[in-house]
Amino acid sequence: MTADDTVRLRGHHLLCLLTYKGLGYSPEFVAGMTATAGRLVAGATVEIVEGPDDICEPLCRSEQNPHCHETTVPERDRRALSLVTSLLGRRLAHGDRFVFDDQLRTRLRAAYRDGAFEQACTLCEWQSLCREIAAGGYQDTLFRSSGEDI
């Protein structure tokens, strides 16, 4: 990773990363999400983007009917950013940059486990699996530092 390593993320992927265990829409999506989780653990900066991000953009270009262009996806982005903004007490919008560190991840995971982001996830097919992962203490998730105690 270089000092200027930046991961472009759409709003709802901030939440998806919290429960990510190596499952996804396709092998290509899983590879992208796994690589992104690793870059963030290594200290990459997040830039919030509108529309396809570093995880789904390659799939949106190569798949015939990619999920990133479904009408529910921008709404999930909007809801996720709004809820994360409320939790953090500061505006989080397109173009904003920050480091998704252990402290932030722990804070968002606690809120996720307590149901704070349900409204952002209601349109997602993975919601029940993510609830189970959160209820199980985020065991075996890939977006975590090596010494992190969840």
Image (tube, rainbow, N blue to C red):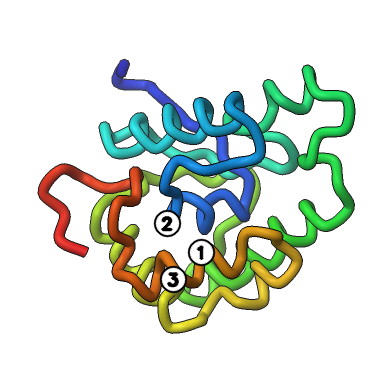
Note whether 61 is above or below 128 in the view shown.
above
Q: Position of residue 16 (x, y in %)?
A: 53, 53
- Disc sitting over residue 88 in the figure: 3
Q: Quadrant of the C terminus?
A: bottom left
- Within 10 Å of disc 2 (Cα), the crowding (few <14, some 14-19, many 20+) is many
Element type at marker 2? Answer: helix
Note whether 39 is above or below 122 in the view shown.
above
User: As rendered, which of 149 and 89 lies closer to the eye?
Assistant: 149
Label 3, label 2: how many angstroms apart (C-alpha)?
16 Å
Residues under numbered marks 3 and 2 in contact, where contact means CB atoms less than 8 Å apart: no
Q: Which tag, 1 or 2, sits closer to the chain's start?
A: 2
- Which label lies toward us, 3 or 1? 1
Residues under numbered marks 1 and 2 in contact, where contact means CB atoms less than 8 Å apart: yes
Q: Amino acid at mark 2?
A: Leu
User: As rendered, which of 24 and 115 lies closer to the eye?
Assistant: 24
Note whether 67 is above or below 115 in the view shown.
above
- On the image, which quarter does residue 135 sit in? bottom left
23 sits to left or right of 59: left
Q: Which tag, 3 or 1, sits closer to the chain's start?
A: 3
- Disc sitting over residue 18 in the figure: 2
